[in-house]
Image (cartoon, rainbow, N blue to C red):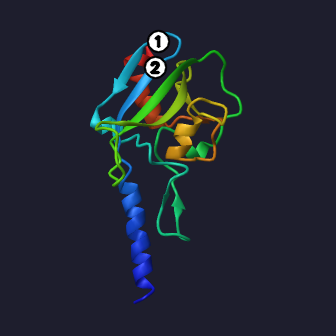
Amino acid sequence: MRRVAPILVVTLLLAASVAAKGPTTRIVITDIERGTVSEITNRSVLDKFQVWAGRGTYSGVPDQQTEGTEGFIVDWPAGTVEQRPGRLRRYELRFYVAPRTSAAPRLGPGEELAYVVLYEHDAATERGYVFLPGRSDEHFGLNVRSIHRGLEGRWLRASHAWQSVFAGLPAAR
């Protein structure tokens, strides 16, 4: 019975830490060239693109954890992209989440900015590319405080799900 109690405590703590990370509440898309801004607030769409999914996220108990391989807006199994087409339109994507439910004091109600990436869309091929800010980029600190994915400073392929949603947005036109 003594061995079960520590395992149960660790399992509950892990569950609590995951629960403390609120769901994605809004994605703000800024067309860097045009300066236009659009938002995704539709719950059924946001549920598909949770910040707390994919590489750098783990589930399970210590020594038996499994790293996430699906989720967020990246096609994680495709790996990094060494070359991508030039002159693609670039967007900044800001992912906001519900306040964490921890006991830590908060400065106020509302959302928290949890993660920022760059996105480029190739309309000719319908492919998208996601850049995770690297050490010298503005949003690196914010991102790695949320999740250290181990691929910071690199371009990756966007998931088909994200590309489909993005193609239907006014920002893509």
Q: Residue drawn 70% across and 29% down? A: 83
Residue 35, given in percent of the width and then of the height, sits at: 47, 12
Residue 124, given in percent of the width and then of the height, sits at: 55, 18
Is there CB contact under 8 Å for labels 1 and 2?
yes
Side of 71 relative to 168 (left or right): right
From this viewpoint, is residue 75 visible?
Answer: no
Q: Which residue is mark 2?
A: 30
Residue 44, given in percent of the width and then of the height, sits at: 29, 38
Q: Residue drawn 38% across and 41% down? A: 48
Local crowd size for mark 2, using a 10 Å CA cut-off: few (<14), some (14–19), many (≥20): many
Residue 67, given in percent of the width and then of the height, sits at: 54, 57
Q: Residue drawn 42% across and 30% down? A: 164
| Quarter in which the C terminus is drawn | top left
Q: Amino acid at mark 1?
A: Gly
- Give the CA separation, mark 1 to mark 2: 6 Å
Q: Viewer-proximal residue, 12 or 118? A: 12
Q: Amino acid at mark 2?
A: Thr
Q: Earlier in the sequence, mark 1 or mark 2?
A: 2
From this viewpoint, is residue 6 visible?
Answer: yes
Look at the numbered disc 2 and give the secondary structure of its residue: strand
* Quadrant assignment, res 108: top left
Q: Residue drawn 35% across and 53% down? A: 102
Which mark is on residue 35?
A: 1
